[in-house]
Amino acid sequence: AQSVTQLDSQVPVFEEAPVELRCNYSSSVSVYLFWYVQYPNQGLQLLLKYLSGSTLVESINGFEAEFNKSQTSFHLRKPSVHISDTAEYFCAVSEGLTSYGKLTFGQGTILTVHP
Amino acid sequence: GAVVSQHPSRVICKSGTSVKIECRSLDFQATTMFWYRQFPKKSLMLMATSNEGSKATYEQGVEKDKFLINHASLTLSTLTVTSAHPEDSSFYICSATYGGMNTEAFFGQGTRLTVV
């Protein structure tokens, strides 16, 4: 069985500062990796995903994450955050090839961007 | 992208009654749907996996008779919380996939259930 650990439950940061949200996983098989964002009282929105190929993946709003197999990590980064990035972020994994869509989530990290 | 709609977004029910939550894929055929529960300040926990036309597969610790899941068509799955109690109050979220190796899950907006 796989598990996901998000090392920070809350991350406060000032606007235009860089941010990193950490995610580590464990699994006995190959995995797909995801970051989801949840705004208050809303469902989850996919931010970015790693399925295969380049280990650095990017989202359309400036976030990026790098899959590091040796460190079993998939940290999320953004070089300059905006107020609108304030939300809760979830890292998730699914076991590749057989369990697409069935996700194991981390505990979530609340990102709060201050002016 | 694919759209998944969940209804209702909020529901309040009395203890002992049952409540049904619908999850619809609006623009694709969802071969598989998943139901998650999110406790306050905690992560989402998978409750069950539902394949169209077959019985749902429940995760360990989830009561099948309490959380009835039906996936009668390729665009609709329902979760019925039977004989609800205050401890069932939670945020329930569904997701749907259309299958395939690299298919992502598309999430509904969630349902906030409050049992009073």
Image (tube, grey):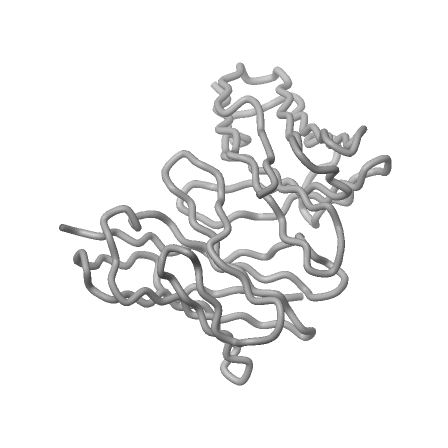
At a point 51% along the width and 20% down the height, the residue shown is B11
Q: Residue A49's x, y, as percent?
A: 54, 62
Q: Residue B91's x, y, as percent?
A: 50, 35
Task: Kindly give the residue lying farthest to the left in the view shown.
Answer: A115
Seen in the image, is A94 located left or right of residue A111? right
Quarter of the picture containing the N terminus of chain B is top right
Q: How many marks?
A: 0
At a point 70% along the width and 66% down the height, the residue shown is A96
Task: Kindly give the residue lying farthest to the bottom in the view shown.
Answer: A70
Q: Is residue B115 above or below residue A47?
A: above
Seen in the image, is B69 located left or right of residue B114? right
Where residue A26 sits, quadrant-wise, is: bottom right
At a point 62% along the width and 15% down the height, the residue shown is B17
Given residues B92 and A49, the one toward you in this image is A49
Q: Is residue B90 above or below residue A57?
A: above
Q: Residue B15's x, y, as percent?
A: 55, 18
Q: Is residue A8 above or below residue B97?
A: below
At a point 64% along the width and 26% down the height, the residue shown is B22
Q: Residue B8's x, y, as percent?
A: 54, 22
